[in-house]
Image: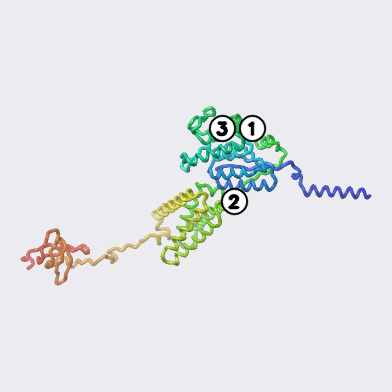
Amino acid sequence: MKRTRILSWLVLLMLSIVLAFPTQTFAKSKVYHVPVENNVEKGLTAFLQRAFQDAKEHGAEAIVLEIHTPGGFTDAAEDIAKIIKQSEDMKVIAFINTKAHSAGALIALNADSIYMTPDATIGAAGVVDSAGNAAELKAQSAWIKQMIAAAESSNRDPQYAQAMADSSLDMSEYGAPKGDFLTLSAEEALKVEYSNGTVKNLQEVLERENLADSIVIDLEPTVAEQIARIVTNPIVIPILLSIASLGLVIELYSPGFGVAGVMGLSALGLFFFGHLIAGIAGYESILLLIIGIILIVAEFFVPGGIVGIIGGASIVLSLLLAGANFVQMGYSILIALLIAVIGMVILMKFFGKKLHMFNKLVLKDATTTEEGYVSNVNRLELIGKKGKTLTPFRPAGVVSIDGERVDAVSDGSYIDAGKHVEIIKVEGSRIVVRAVSEETEE
């Protein structure tokens, strides 16, 4: 009886341990599977920062970056490369499915191992500016050095990494003659030892790395991170700022608060929200924005204009501080202002009569003569009257009409003082006289 009781307690104890620690706990290791898709930008950097931090906190043995990107911005790629280098306790595996071009190539080259699908490619990492032209030599040189360093850090031949970013090298053997950037296929990458193997899927990657029995944790961007990735894209930024500026200007001259104001504030809110989530903007930029808005509102109650100017400057400065790059943000702000001005002109031209806002922008009253508005007295009663010149007319002078001195001009001829004249025309303040003979006067 006593033995049976002891066995029962042991069974209960074992069941408690099993229930308290699921079977996953006894697996060999954890592997984080993280997608690196679409353009490489600051929003992706923030997502990968969280992914690596989460993997480290949960004791992951490895993190697999499944790469499918045409490239993106070099500064974001360099930040991601730094995150990878700092993860010394975890093995970083790049699984290229199906392309790692430009900035994506730098990310892959910083990984400990690279695996590629049969149709995958890596390379084409030349630096170009926003207009699609080759970047300045200084930027190109720095980027090439980054590519070489990434290859050397993982014991790969750096000449291929250099050729991916430097078109002056001749890699005709791999379809990249002088003048072209090198792009390696899966077979070529395996041949030059830039790839550790050609695989069909993630499971094969794990098998090659002896991680087939590991717990695979698929990590996806949160909704906030997805929004951040969209709104931190340099192409989207000027669009958001244009909507914000145009919407707020329209709302400023409209009665009440309507759709335009909601759109403007929403666009501005998305801009700052995305940049805060991405870790680009700080709270100082939000504070400057709030101060700027308060000062602009105060301009309606404080005469002089200086308060509004300071408020506008505060808002512009807040946008510059929120951006990842001062120059790019400067261009974005200029584009937004230009689009706002063009939009205002279009609205004024085609919808000005229908929109209440333009009643305060456009002067519609006309000071016409028919309504009694004149710049000076039009003395039509003087026509036909005769008088005597008090000064010579060359062609302007003074004439006496019924004892009144009147400024006038001759009809083109010289008239001496003391001559008899007749007023032949009155055009506003212009009175025209013509000489007449004394006989006619009499």
Instruction: Return the disc, 3 or 1, that comes first in the chain's sequence.
Output: 3
Asked if residue 356 is positioned above or below residue 43 in the image, the reply reads below
Q: Secondary structure at mark 3?
A: strand
Q: Name the spot of residue 239 as percent of width and height, x first.
A: 49, 50
Q: Can residue 233 be seen from the camera position used here? A: yes
x 56%, y 32%: residue:
184
Query: Which callout, 1 or 2, points to the residue nearer the camera?
Result: 1
Outermost bottom residue: 403
Any mark on residue 409, and which? none
Disc 1 marks which residue?
A: 197
| Quarter of the figure with residue 411 | bottom left
Q: Nearer the viewer, residue 400 or 14?
A: 14
Disc 2 marks which residue?
A: 224
Q: Amino acid at mark 3?
A: Leu
Q: Name the spot of residue 116 as percent of width and height, x first.
A: 61, 34
Mark 1 neighbour density, 10 Å: few (under 14) some (14–19) many (20 or more):
many
Q: Secondary structure at mark 2?
A: helix
Task: Determine the CA span between mark 3 and mark 1.
Answer: 14 Å
Q: Name the spot of residue 363 as percent of width and height, x first.
A: 36, 61
Q: Are marks 1 and 2 in contact (CB under 8 Å)?
A: no
* Left or right: residue 406 compared with residue 9: left
Q: Amino acid at mark 2?
A: Ala
Mark 2 neighbour density, 10 Å: few (under 14) some (14–19) many (20 or more):
some
x 49%, y 30%: residue:
178
Any mark on residue 184, and which? 3
